[in-house]
Amino acid sequence: MTWVIPDKQGGCFLFLHIQPGAKKEGVAGTYGNALKICLAARATDGKANAALLSYLAACLKVPKTSLAIIRGEKSREKTVRAAGKTPEAVVAALFPLLNTNEKNPS
């Protein structure tokens, strides 16, 4: 998967394309070399960024503090670092959600 690569500290980087203001939340597939995630939150006052981190934390079953937006705070194209998660673990957690539009993964 080109949208997730390992980092040198035992975590990984996720390359994401975010669609804020979507009617349905979920993993929508790939968008170029990025994973596309749809969020209901609007891209105002950092609401979409906060919703993204909450969504990823729930999907990956990690605390929000282990996730950080490294690049793209004000862009749809974002790079997120997931501390303590291997690329394989991230793919295993997110791949089953592909096109299911699950709002609250468990």
Image (cartoon, rainbow, N blue to C red):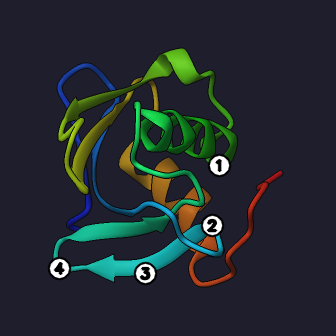
* N-terminal-most mark, 4 or 1: 4
Question: At numbered mark 3, what does the secondary structure look like: helix, strand or loop?
Answer: strand
* Residue at mark 2: 25
* N-terminal-most mark, 1 or 3: 3
Looking at the rendered structure, the kind of residue marked 3 is Gly
Please give the name of the residue rendered at 46% of the width and 65% of the height, measured from the top-left corner.
Answer: 37
The spot of residue 56 in percent (x, y) is 55, 44
Check if mark 4's residue and mark 1's residue have beta carbons within 8 Å: no
As measured in the structure, the alpha-carbon distance from the residue carrying label 3 to the one carrying label 4 is 10 Å
* Residue at mark 1: 59
- Callout 3 environment at 10 Å: few (<14), some (14 to 19), or many (20+)? some
Looking at the rendered structure, the kind of residue marked 2 is Glu
As measured in the structure, the alpha-carbon distance from the residue carrying label 4 to the one carrying label 1 is 22 Å
* Residue at mark 3: 29
Looking at the rendered structure, the kind of residue marked 4 is Gly
Looking at the rendered structure, the kind of residue marked 1 is Cys
Please give the name of the residue rendered at 25% of the width and 57% of the height, measured from the top-left corner.
Answer: 76
* Residue at mark 4: 32
Q: The N terminus is located in which quarter?
A: bottom left
Question: At numbered mark 1, what does the secondary structure look like: helix, strand or loop?
Answer: helix
Q: Is residue 93 above or below residue 99?
A: above
Question: At numbered mark 4, what does the secondary structure look like: helix, strand or loop?
Answer: loop
